[in-house]
Amino acid sequence: MNKALRKAIIAGNWKMNKTRPEAKALLDAIKPLVANAEGNVEVVACVPFTNLETAVNATAGSNVKVGAENVHFEKSGAFTGEISADMLVEVGVEYVVIGHSERRQYFGETDETVNKRTVAALAAGLKPIVCVGELKWERQCNITEEVVGRQIKLDLWSVSKEDVKKVVIAYEPVWAIGTGLTATPEQAEEVCAFIRAQLAKLYDQETADAVTIQYGGSMNAKNAAELLAKPNIDGGLIGGASLKAEDFNVIVQAAVNG
Ligand code: 13P
């Protein structure tokens, strides 16, 4: 395994936080702090739909990329409340979070719709950040690999070898999200290595080695360096700690130095 074969990506997932002026202020604070990551670590801010244009303008000319938090799989039509991949591209968005556990838990997202959204995002030229992860009781029942293996297989169904290299996989154990409970570096590494092995089975080793796999779930300024030092953890998807410029930057610097 060689980490140098793939891009390190630190992405903030702001969830349902920040008004437009707040979004601009946060990005203005983040930009100078993370400027040194350019060419080494990709820095992404995934923001609510209403903040996308503000974020694209605020980050213009900087090394901070903008992502959305969801995307619909149809190109257009009678889908009230949804946003298409082409709409995101037109605003200047590069990344999109797909299948976050909050979407799966609260909004009925399934592996089938996650797959359809992933395929649509890739077709439009977006880079999907596909989230997978087990529930607490699934870990307790010792079926983490079964659950995550199934998600990987279904969520990436029909995605080609060329396209899967543009996909970022975020391993987010549901029990670690917003709870302050972080997976230990060993637990996180074990599942990220398993995900890479699954990718090697579905595609081949060269392809698996090219895919960025992030850890997410209470990653913060204190625990990031240890997690990011693991051979199969190529980055982080950060919730709470991405809402504070200094904390987010500590995580970015841990990736730069890691
Ligand atoms: P927290 O970092 O707040 O636990 O959230 C993680 C997450 O869900 C990122 O997508």
Image (cartoon, rainbow, N blue to C red):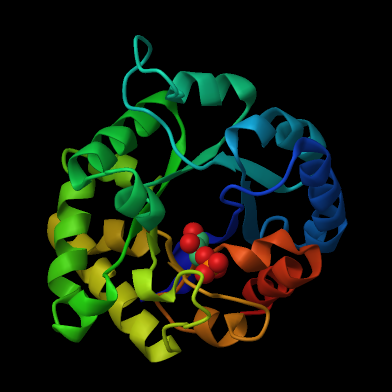
Please determine whether, in this image, residue 89 is positioned above or below residue 189: above
Q: Position of residue 47 (x, y in %)?
A: 62, 43
Q: Is residue 129 visible?
A: yes
* Residue located at (83% from left, 39% from top): 21
Looking at this rendering, what residue extends furthest in the front direction? 106
Image quarter hosting the C terminus: bottom right
From the viewer's side, name the closer residue of 231 and 155. 155
Residue 152 occupies which quadrant of the picture? bottom left
Q: Position of residue 169 (x, y in %)?
A: 37, 57
Q: Position of residue 205 (x, y in %)?
A: 23, 64
Q: How many marks?
A: 0
Q: Is residue 61 visible?
A: no
Left/right placement of residue 55 relative to residue 191 reads right
Left/right placement of residue 157 relative to residue 207 reads left
Q: Position of residue 188 (x, y in %)?
A: 38, 80
* Residue located at (75% from left, 32% from top): 54
* Residue located at (20% from left, 47% from top): 111
Image quarter hosting the N terminus: bottom left
Left/right placement of residue 155 relative to residue 90 reads left
* Residue located at (27% from left, 43% from top): 108
